[in-house]
Amino acid sequence: MIKHLILLSFSLFNFGPNPPPPPAAPPLPGQFKVVSPFLFLILIQRRQTAMPKKKWEKKETENACNSLGWKSMTLFSQIHLNSTNPLLVKAARGEPVSRPPAWMMRQAGRYMAIYRKLAEKYPSFRERSETTDLIVEISLQPWEAFRPDGVIIFSDILTPLPAFGVPFDIEDIRGPVIQSPITSEEGLKSLHPIDLEKLSFVRESLQILRNEVGNHAAVLGFVGAPWTIATYIVEGGTTRTYTTIKKMCHTAPHVLRALLSHLTQAISEYIVFQVESGAHCIQIFDSWGGQLTPEMWEKWSKPYIEEIVRLTRSKCPEIPLVLYINGNGGLLERMKGTGVDVIGLDWTVDMADGRKRLGSGISVQGNVDPACLFSPLPALTEEIQRVVRCAGPQGHILNLGHGVLVGTPEEAVKHFFDVARTLKYDTPQNQAVEEPNLVA
């Protein structure tokens, strides 16, 4: 092997009596400049000896520069080089498309037999969601089975917490548990700027997913919104009443604002990190924003999401941002004001009504009731077609109104995506919101 590399290096660097090549153009920003063939050999040998073989090594050659510390081309540079972007990205931007792209929240998970079998072998959720090989394998399970138009990384909104000073565990019964909730100025002292190197498994997974699916589907990253993340940090885990954090809004607003501001900065950096790692699109989950009154959401969640959008746009202006809130019927107009590209509607909102309330200039995502996947397949087909008709022929990403439910038949999920692929818009430029011409 070394012998071949030596021969290769001498041919690459033009040793011998041949005339020297013309002066090379200066390296591009971030481009590695090779000093000698021997350094070239050392770097390759270090990679071979220091990094064990992985299941996905066949696709890692394009990412070797990242393992050696070389800066890869960022995604927003790639966008300008790619002649075509995935269908989902076009729909998110409101560009004309031939049909609605489709993916599902929680499309990788316990409803799939292949996932349950893997979970038996690796019972720890943290291990499954923080080990590159497992993340990639799980993320690709629905892609290989159903070919959705979006492949979302298998992760959790709490995944980045330890990287900025908030350790957590996930227990089988209680779910997420934070042993030291932050409810005071003293608690704020444990926070520090996000250390993205502690999230290298996210970077590696997104890079591999991007290589695996190419532009045949959009690779999606995601984050939790500051308010939603704060509910876990303040309450110490999941809760039904959100009493402690709601009380803080009135009794310790300065502490809560400081926490939300810190989360805003960390989450913004995490979004850019995911984009630079290969994500085509980012979804922001303000899952528990619907627990606030519209006025309280305007005060305690919206400004921080707006700041995330501003910071992200300054670094990644081309990347579509999706905002989803569970129970968002009373918040749609306010959600549009955050500046995101796409509003995810939950299943309690009538799609046609949501379109009217949001108006033009923004795309929507959703919003088939997850329970409809238990219905007979002809009824599911009718519901999919109804939602698509009400959404209109431009700026719509077909999805559920919430995540796939445990126990959902895999046959129904396959049918959902099969139906989505049969839908064709007759007039992609039609601006009608209700009842566009559709053929199946």
Image: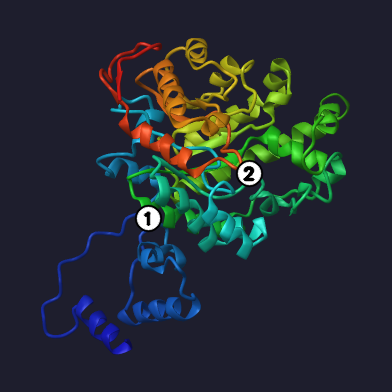
Quadrant of the snapshot with the C terminus: top left
Tell me the amino acid under the disc marked 2. Answer: Ile
Q: Are marks 2 and 1 in contact (CB under 8 Å)?
A: no
The answer to whether residue 215 shows anywhere in this view is yes
* Residue with the mark numbered 1: 212
**Rendering quarter of residue 265:** top right
Q: Nearer the viewer, residue 428 or 9?
A: 428
**Rendering quarter of residue 345:** top right
Q: What element does badge 2 sit on?
A: loop
* Residue with the mark numbered 2: 157
Q: What element does badge 1 sit on?
A: helix
Image mark for residue 136: none
Q: Where is residue 103 in the image (x, y as percent from the top left)?
A: 45, 37
Q: Which of 144 and 192 is in front in this view?
A: 144
Lateral position of residue 317 relative to residue 118, left or right: left
At 78% from the left and 49% from the top, the residue drawn is 173
Lateral position of residue 307 relative to residue 137, left or right: right
Q: Going by the picture, which residue comes out furthest to the left?
A: 18
